[in-house]
Amino acid sequence: MKEKTIAAILAFFGGIVGLQRFYLGQKGLGMAHLFFFVLALSAGPSPFTIMLISLAAIFGIIDAITLLSMERREFDLKYNQPVAQATPHAGPAAPPYNTGSMTDRERRFQERQRQRAEMERERERRDKERNNQRTEPVPQRAGRRDAGRADRERGVHYFKDYEYRRAIEAFQKALGKNPRDVAAHFNIACAYSVEEEADRAFYHLDRAVALGFDDFDRIRNHDSLAYLRIQPAFPAFERNNFRLATAEPQRVPNTEDPLVASDTEGAPAPAAPVHDELLEQLQRLARLREKGLLTEVEFATQKRRLLG
């Protein structure tokens, strides 16, 4: 079992005659070093001899630095081939060591290598499990895929970073892909509340409750809905179980219109006029759409709900 520290020391102090090469099992290179050293000495004192000896010493120092800077794995692959086969990259099928002629130090070293290999395999197994947990899709009802999940999660990320307009855009994309996404409706309501757009916040909170959101304590206590809770319309909204009130059209007899026949017996009942409150709500929706506060989809959905 060769140690790179010992090899580096031999290269630094005995590199001039190639001691490190003999230690590392490179007997051919060691003999070459020794041959040139003896040849330089036999040539007698001369500038050429001094140059050869100096070069040999420099090469030994370079070898020492190289060995010290070499990774343990690389050193074992190059000079301790049996040990290198026992590293984690060799896998569980690596051949066993021949421990018959090993010293205690070598056995301890191989035991440490075996433990490191097991720890590395265990770490890789845990990493794979975590990656699988991140990539596994959340099961949906009846096996349906959550189409807007990625946009909704991106919106939550923007919301936490206080980028509310970008969060709203992401939630709108999620609702465009899945209009029945309860979480996206609630989250965009929070974002609109923070942006002090109460009408749109009320609308999306109403849609979230209509689609099954029932955590009313969260509506009463959520920090992002604080602006919504101070609005004059919030008490009525809360009394109506957090739903927007829908005005019911009433039948009003038209007795003042001179075009209406006095005798209506047997004639179909006249169409009920639009109630003043309902008309006001429709006009309000139209104004919100003109200002760009409601999209066409939101306007059509709210109008259809008001008209029954």
Image (tube, rainbow, N blue to C red):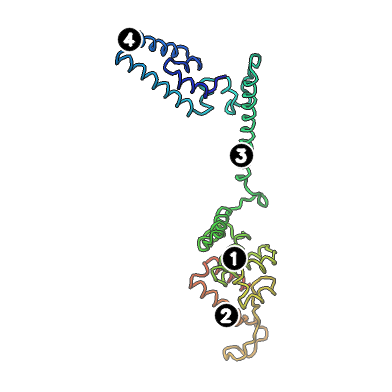
| Figure quadrant of residue 285 | bottom right
Image location (x, y in percent) of residue 182:
63, 60
Residue drawn at x 36%, y 10% as measured from the top left = 41
Three-letter amino acid code at the position of disc 1: Cys
In primary-sequence order, the first of circles 2 and 4 is 4
Q: Residues within 10 Å of mark 1 (few under 14, many from 20)?
A: many
**Nearest the camera: 109 or 217?**
109
Q: Which residue is mark 4?
A: 44
**Nearest the camera: 47 or 62?**
47
Work out how far the residue at label 3 is from the one at label 4, CA to CA, in angstroms: 65 Å
Q: Which residue is mark 3?
A: 127
Work out how far the residue at label 3 is from the one at label 1, CA to CA, in angstroms: 36 Å
Work out how far the residue at label 3 is from the one at label 2, CA to CA, in angstroms: 60 Å
Contact, mark 4 vs mark 1 (Cβ under 8 Å): no
Q: Residues within 10 Å of mark 3 (few under 14, many from 20)?
A: few
In primary-sequence order, the first of circles 1 and 2 is 1
Work out how far the residue at label 4 is from the one at label 1, CA to CA, in angstroms: 93 Å
Could you tell me which quadrant the C terminus lies in? bottom right
**Nearest the camera: 294 or 169?**
169
Residue drawn at x 60%, y 44% as measured from the top left = 135
Three-letter amino acid code at the position of disc 3: Asp
In primary-sequence order, the first of circles 4 and 1 is 4
Q: Which residue is mark 1?
A: 190
Three-letter amino acid code at the position of disc 4: Gly
Could you tell me which quadrant the N terminus lies in? top right
Three-letter amino acid code at the position of disc 2: Glu
Q: Residue 38's mark?
A: none
Q: Which residue is mark 2?
A: 280
Q: Residues within 10 Å of mark 2 (few under 14, many from 20)?
A: few
Work out how far the residue at label 2 is from the one at label 4, CA to CA, in angstroms: 116 Å
From this view, report whether residue 112 is shown above or below residue 123.
Answer: above
Left or right: 125 in relation to 15 = right
